Amino acid sequence: MSDNDTTTRILAIQRVMACASPSSWRDALVLSVVDGLVELATLAGDVVRVSTGAPVAAGDPVAYHPTAEVLALGTDWYPAR
């Protein structure tokens, strides 16, 4: 993570957890977005549903950290529970 990354939308503990366990990040594509519920398809083949305020649309590439409950859209990180 560089100094230019935006992590202010998440809790400090989420940032610490995500940075402490970088191997837990999962690359994914957004399948659908309905009322803040986002369905993701990870590149490992899993489908995950999270509640988030991230400004994503179907087809967007994202990264998801299930332990820290964080969704990354570019350098912006959002809570994802």
Image (tube, rainbow, N blue to C red):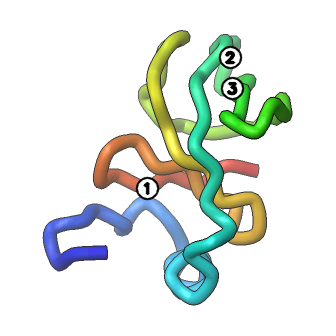
Is 45 situated above or below 9?
above
Q: How crowded is mark 1: few (under 14 residues within 10 Å), some or many (20 or more)?
A: many
Tag shown at residue 35: 2
Query: Distance between the Cα atoms at labels 2 and 3?
Result: 8 Å
Q: Residue 72, image x and y in percent?
A: 46, 49
For mark 1, what is the residue?
Answer: 77
For mark 3, what is the residue?
Answer: 38
Mark 1 is on which residue type?
Trp
Q: Give the mark nearer the N terminus: 1 vs 2.
A: 2
Q: In which quarter of the image is residue 68?
A: bottom right
Q: Give the mark nearer the N terminus: 3 vs 1.
A: 3
Is 20 situated above or below 71?
below
Q: How crowded is mark 2: few (under 14 residues within 10 Å), some or many (20 or more)?
A: few
Q: In this view, does 7 lie to the left or right of 26?
A: left
In the rendered image, the quadrant that contains the N terminus is bottom left
Q: Nearer the viewer, mark 2 or mark 3?
A: 3
Q: Residue 42, image x and y in percent?
A: 70, 35
Q: How crowded is mark 3: few (under 14 residues within 10 Å), some or many (20 or more)?
A: many
Mark 2 is on which residue type?
Asp
Q: Is residue 48 left or right of residue 69?
A: right
Q: Residue 43, image x and y in percent?
A: 67, 34
Mark 3 is on which residue type?
Val
How many numbered tags mark residues here? 3
Residue visible at 63% across and 81% down? Answer: 21
Residue visible at 57% across and 43% down? Answer: 27
